[in-house]
Amino acid sequence: ALYYHALQLLKKDTETTFQELHQLLEVHQDILTDDNRKALSAICRNFCVRRYNSGQEAYLQILYDLYLTHLKNGDLYHENCLLASTFRNLVTMGLHLKQYDWVNQFIQDHQHRITGTRHPHEVYQLNLANYYFALARYEEALKHLPNQQGDLYYKLATKRLELKIYYETKSPLLSSRIDAFKVYIFRISKTLLPELKREGYNNFIDFLKRIYSPKTYWDKDRVHKLLKEVEECKVLVEKEWLRKKLQEISEKI
């Protein structure tokens, strides 16, 4: 029944099938080998990821709860370590759901248990910086930004977070950093950064530059126009954060 519902979920991707597989796993997980239990658990998580990415926000809490259960069961570990992507996913979900105490404890407990990357300390640093950023402790977030010597994903994430910190602190460095990031994106080869991702970053840079413009803070029509453009933009990094910044400006005008 477990394997049947797992196959059906891969084929049909329905809420009913997900619930049936999830319930069967909770009741009968002890009869499975560790590898099979991990594989079936991953199928459940991937279903929630697809639903959340399609815009169904309620699935984030379901996904987070699944991750916590699978973490407790040991299903997320590889030789007692967590993949960098799993570590990042747990931190990101926890921060989004405002589980700040849990995130802090999780980061500290696992800082020496990150695998799947040549630069585990940078993964730890970036996630810790994101934690401090979520708490609006911007100076501490800036202090913990990694030196960007790792994988391209973490270089881009670090530069993006740096821009957000400079925006929040009204740093005079923001304008020059935006321009430098634009040049950096332009210079990355298309084999390393596919066109769709490049477009998402370029749109983020362009929107941030327009939001940061002084005239935006005095023109409600301009703010509403930008909000509409952000909502309609199909490929955009940090869309939720940009939307939030524009809404904050709108409320002050």
Image (tube, rainbow, N blue to C red):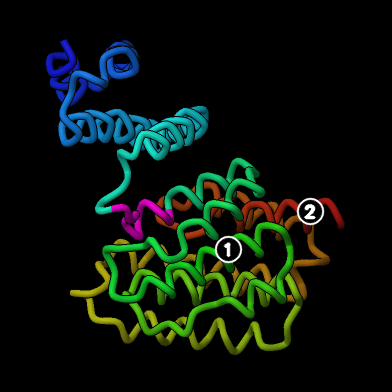
Q: Is residue 70 placed above or below 220 in the rendered structure? A: above
**In front: 208, or 66?**
66
Residue 82 is one of the magenta-drawn residues: yes
Work out how far the residue at label 1 is from the one at label 2, CA to CA, in angstroms. 25 Å
Residue underneath mark 1: 130
Give the crowd class for mark 2: few <14, some 14-19, many >=20 residues within 10 Å.
some
Residue 244 at x, y percent in the picture: 67, 52
Q: Is residue 149 placed above or below 250 in the rendered structure? A: below
Ranked by sequence position, the earlier of labels 1 and 2 is 1
Residue at image point 29% right, 69% down: 117
Q: Secondary structure at mark 1?
A: helix
**Relative to residue 234, is residue 239 drawn left or right?**
right
Residue 81 at x, y percent in the picture: 33, 56
Residue 37 at x, y percent in the picture: 22, 29
**Relative to residue 79, is residue 89 drawn left or right?**
right
The magenta region covers 80-88
